[in-house]
Amino acid sequence: MDKAESVCMHRNYPMESHPSIPIGNIRLVGPLARSGYSLVMGREQQSEIAFRIVIEQPVPGVLHSLQGKDDRPLDPKASRMGEALAFDFSVRVGPGPKFFGDQVRREGPERRFVYIRVGQMAGDAASPWSRRMKIDIHDIDQELLDAAAKDMRPIEIAIIGTGKDGTPACATVRPTMRRIA
């Protein structure tokens, strides 16, 4: 082991004086190592849960889509007469709960959400709107997550797709309902 690997970076103590656990190229030192803490959560600790976002009262004719893992539109669709739009996707949920998946985005240490792209961002270059809706999932009750995993049924999140000004909703959009579908 070279000197860079054998010295604790926060204190100039030799690594040998601290209890440590190697994890790949990372070595946990001190209290974390003694606690049995792991930086890696195996997929066996995660449950795959189906989600459905229902956009009620979308602005007719405006394209909406999920945001794919490559930051591109995924499953774009528009409402002809204001009928609801539904987007289905899956999320892996681990203890905590912690959320993982292609549509899950993060902001800070806790906040996890899903983007719905609108107008130009959903792939309609002629749209006058270029927006995203942010739908939080990190604050879903553990009981609802457990029921969805047990019953193998999706969690349905309903939102209103039209803002007070009559244009497509954007920014953080609060759910009007969360339930097992």
Image: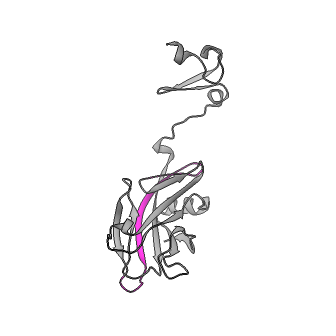
- Of residues 61 and 69, the one drawn nearer to the viewer in this rendering: 61
Specify the segment rendered in magenta.
Answer: 80-101
Q: From the viewer's perspective, is residue 90 above or below residue 98? A: below
143 left or right of 91 in image:
right
User: Which residue is pictured at 47% across the width and 81% down the height?
Assistant: 57
Q: Quadrant of residue 63?
A: bottom left
Q: Quadrant of residue 64?
A: bottom left
Q: Position of residue 131 (x, y in %)?
A: 45, 68
> Residue farthest to the bottom?
81
User: Which residue is pictured at 51% across the width and 45% down the height?
Assistant: 45
Q: From the viewer's perspective, is residue 153 above or below residue 31? A: below
Instruction: Specify whether residue 104 is painted magenta.
Output: no
* Number of marks drawn: 0
Instruction: Specify whether residue 93 is painted magenta.
Output: yes
User: Which residue is pictured at 61% across the width and 61% down the height?
Assistant: 143
User: Which residue is pictured at 47% across the width and 44% down the height?
Assistant: 44
175 left or right of 132 in image:
right
73 left or right of 176 in image:
left
- Of residues 97 and 9, the one drawn nearer to the viewer in this rendering: 9
Q: Position of residue 113 (x, y in %)?
A: 52, 59
- Give the image's coloring scheme: one colour
Q: Position of residue 174 (x, y in %)?
A: 58, 70
Q: Position of residue 79 (x, y in %)?
A: 37, 80
Q: From the viewer's perspective, is residue 46 above or below residue 82? A: above
